[in-house]
């Protein structure tokens, strides 16, 4: 899909999903989406946020990103791993985030798996990027692929939740392993 009919005040054409009325979303599109990420802290944050996106729009999650950062101790892996039932219940009462009980429980469980992968691969970045041989993959118009299928299957086998192939594909796009800016987007390479 193309958004050639969209009106952009700066004259740049962007991917169809970018909402010109949401400055935060446009900034995300222009400065973050598709940029390769190697930092485990950022990879953890994005994985947790993508898991909360399940069944919702990324724009909805992105609009709550600051509230998520505050609620999840700036995505400090060790702190999230230590959350107990009482703290998870406190998160369920936080109106600034998505308060789905299963997603909150999954975030804590996924943090523990993330930490185990870090130990095994000397970093989650090493784990994630090894699936593509350290290379960025250029493709558009897809919501899953053999790559996202493989990673999703491995993460599920390790015990992660809310990591289906579509969520993982969106995650790979967000962290720059899959580069999907559309051909008419000013960021298309």
Image (cartoon, helix red, strand yellow):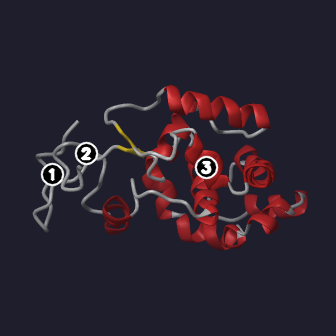
Indicate the position of residue 168 as horizontal and vertical percent values: 55, 39
Label 2 neighbour load within 10 Å: few <14, some 14-19, many 20+: some
Q: Is residue 98 visible?
A: no
**Residue 114 against residue 67 in the figure, above or below:** above
Indicate the position of residue 141 as horizontal and vertical percent values: 32, 32
Label 3 neighbour load within 10 Å: few <14, some 14-19, many 20+: many
**Residue 10 against residue 34 in the figure, above or below:** below
Q: Which residue is mark 2?
A: 16
Marks 1 and 2 close (CB-CB < 8 Å): yes
Q: CA distance from mark 1 to mark 3?
A: 28 Å
Dot 3: element: helix
> Which numbered tag is attached to residue 6?
1
Closer to the camera, 99 or 130?
130
Indicate the position of residue 66 as horizontal and vertical percent values: 55, 71
Q: Answer left or right for 52 relative to 89.
A: left
Q: Answer left or right for 149 relative to 135.
A: right
Q: Residue 86 appears in which quarter of the rendering? A: bottom right
Sequence-wise first label, 1 or 3: 1
């Amino acid at each position: 899909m193309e958004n050639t009919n969209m009106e952009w005040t700066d004259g740049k054409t962007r991917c169809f999903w970018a909402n010109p009325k949401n400055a935060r979303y446009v900034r995300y599109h222009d400065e973050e989406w598709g940029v390769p990420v190697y930092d485990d802290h950022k990879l953890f944050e994005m994985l947790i946020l993508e898991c909360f996106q399940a069944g919702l729009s990324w724009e909805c999650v992105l609009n709550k990103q600051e509230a998520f950062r505050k609620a999840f101790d700036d995505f400090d892996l060790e702190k999230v791993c230590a959350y107990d039932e009482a703290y998870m219940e406190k998160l369920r009462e936080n109106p600034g985030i998505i308060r789905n009980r299963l997603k909150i429980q999954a975030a804590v469980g996924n943090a523990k798996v993330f930490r185990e992968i870090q130990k095994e691969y000397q970093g989650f970045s090493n784990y994630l990027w090894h699936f593509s041989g350290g290379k960025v993959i250029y493709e558009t118009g897809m919501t899953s692929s053999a790559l996202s299928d493989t990673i999703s299957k491995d993460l599920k086998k390790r015990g992660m939740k809310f990591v289906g192939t579509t969520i993982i594909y969106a995650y790979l796009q967000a962290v720059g392993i899959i580069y999907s800016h559309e051909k008419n987007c000013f960021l298309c390479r």
